[in-house]
Image (cartoon, rainbow, N blue to C red):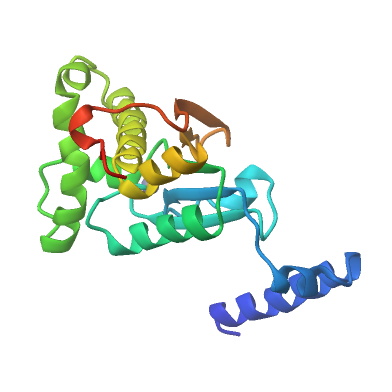
Amino acid sequence: MQPYEKLLLENKAWAADKVKGDPEYFKRLSLLQTPDFLWIGCSDSRVPANEITGTQPGEIFVHRNVANMVVNTDVNLLSVLDYAVNHLQVKHVIVCGHYGCGGVKAAMTNTDFKALLNMWLRNIKDVYRLHRAELDSITDENIRIDRLTELNVKEQVFNLAKTSIIQRAWKNERRPDLHGWVYGLKDGIINPVFEMNAGTHIDAIYEYDDI
Ligand SMILES: [Zn+2]
C-alpha cells in the first residue's frame, strides 16, 4: 500500500466512526458552518488547530502559512480575513505561533534561502529589527528565538488591526477581539501572550477616519 492510500483508508474509518456516534453528523455540518473563531497559524504539521484546542469541524475557520504571518499584500490571507469577519462574523481572530518555529529560526540567520523564501522571511526580520534592543540583550539563543516568536505573534496582531477589514468591523459591530498565542511543542500548552479588544486604538498613522 502506498503511504497516501493509508490516508484514504483512515478517512473511511473516521467517517464511519463519526456516523456511528451521531448519524446526522455530516448532514448537519454540510448545511452550515458558524465558527466563532478565525485561526491564523503556522503550516507546521505539529500544530493542528482543531486537535490542540479540542474543537470539532465547524468550530474554527483556519488559515495557515509559514510562521503565521499577516502580510498586508497577501491576497490569500486578506480574503480569508474578509470572509471570516464579514460573512462568517467570527467573534475572535487568533494568531497562533509556536515555540521552535522553523520560519522564525530561519529568519534569524543570514542564510540566503533564495528569492521566494527570502521575501517571506523578510517580514520576520523586520520584526527583529523593531525589537532589536530587547532581542540582542538576550544571550541564550533559544530564549532569543522564543522571544522573537512571541514578539512576532504580537506584531501580526497589530498587522490585523491595521487592516480596514478589522477597523470597519470594530466600528460597526465591536468585534472581533484579537488574540496572540504561542503553542509549546514540548508540552502542548498554549501561552496567551497578547490581546487586543475590539475598538482598541493603534498608532494613529494606521487608523482610517472615513471607515
Ligand atoms: Zn512554524
Residue 35 lies left or right of residue 165; in this view the side is right
The percent position of residue 115, horizontal first and vertical second, equals 11, 62
Q: Write the residue at 43% across / 53% down.
A: 44
The percent position of residue 24, horizontal first and vertical second, equals 86, 71
The percent position of residue 30, horizontal first and vertical second, equals 70, 73
Residue 75 lies left or right of residue 119; in this view the side is right
Residue 132 lies left or right of residue 40; in this view the side is left
Q: Write the residue at 21% across / 54% down.
A: 120
On the question of residue 55 being in view, the answer is yes
In the orientation shown, which residue stands out farthest toward the bottom?
A: 1
Name above or below for residue 15 compared with residue 211: below
Residue 194 lies left or right of residue 60; in this view the side is left
Q: Quadrant of residue 193?
A: top left
Q: Write the residue at 57% across / 32% down.
A: 189
The percent position of residue 2, horizontal first and vertical second, equals 55, 83
Q: Quadrant of residue 135?
A: top left
